[in-house]
Image (spheres, rainbow, N blue to C red):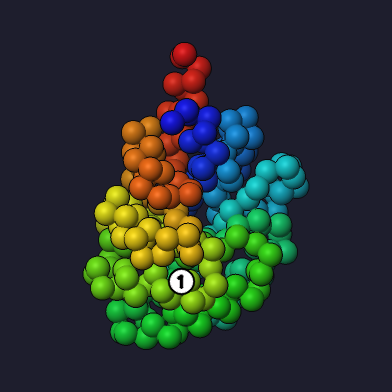
Amino acid sequence: MENKEILQHIDHTLLKPTATWQEIQQLCQEALDHGCATVCIPPCFVLKVKEQFPQLKVCTVVGFPLGYQIQAVKSAETWDARQNGADEIDLVINRCDVKSGNLGEVVAEIGAIRQLVPDRVLKVIVETCEMTKEEKIALCYCVARGGADYIKTSTGFGSAGAELEDIKLFKELMGDRLKIKAAGGIRSKEQMEAFLAAGCDRIGTSSAKVLWEEISHT
């Protein structure tokens, strides 16, 4: 794939807890300069980014990174992000519910967040590295039933990131019913191409720089 085409699928990401406003500004300018799909940033920066970069699509996270906040807290986070101008929400599921077998609660939480942002893109992070194959299969259906747009592999804060076999599983189960975002540990052009070829629509990475550096040297 051409680098510019890959960049159109990239959520240019900076979610480290020590991120500075200067780093976020640089991230946003890079995303605009190189045609990334969005920037994915901490909630505390959303309003300032929308004010300074109104033409940029902004993604932020809810329940990040552990996901075990009560639903009321996640709802408040979501509403705040919406009011501040976030275009996309990446929601971390409650993995305690998954491991306890309370999949109905997972669906209900996703559905409640969907109702708050019916006109925004909603992605649901399932942290694949912590899930059995059976749980991954069940979560595909939970995410779809909850009304989300995407299933997303990882927070990038777990013990491992995205795996191609999980993307292939999600695609086989869901087809075009759910879009897929891979995130966590994706650092090379070759990896990005492989995940897109396997069926991803988005890639979350802090390593998009490798693509425009290659462009600048051609």
Quarter of the picture containing the N terminus is: top left
- Image quadrant assignment for residue 29: top right
Nearer to us in this view, 171 or 140: 171
Q: Is residue 145 above or below residue 37?
A: below
Can you give x and y, in whole percent of width and height, for residue 130 in the image?
Answer: 28, 66
| Residue lying furthest top | 218
- Residue at image location 43% in from the left, 36% down from the top: 207
Q: Which residue is mark 1?
A: 143
Residue ID at (38%, 43%): 197
- Amino acid type of disc 1? Val
**Which residue: 54% across, 49% down?**
40
Q: Is residue 181 visible?
A: yes
Helix, strand or loop for disc 1: helix
Q: Residue at x 31, y 84 (%)?
A: 100
Say if residue 18 shows up in the picture: no
Q: Position of residue 103 (x, y in %)?
A: 39, 82
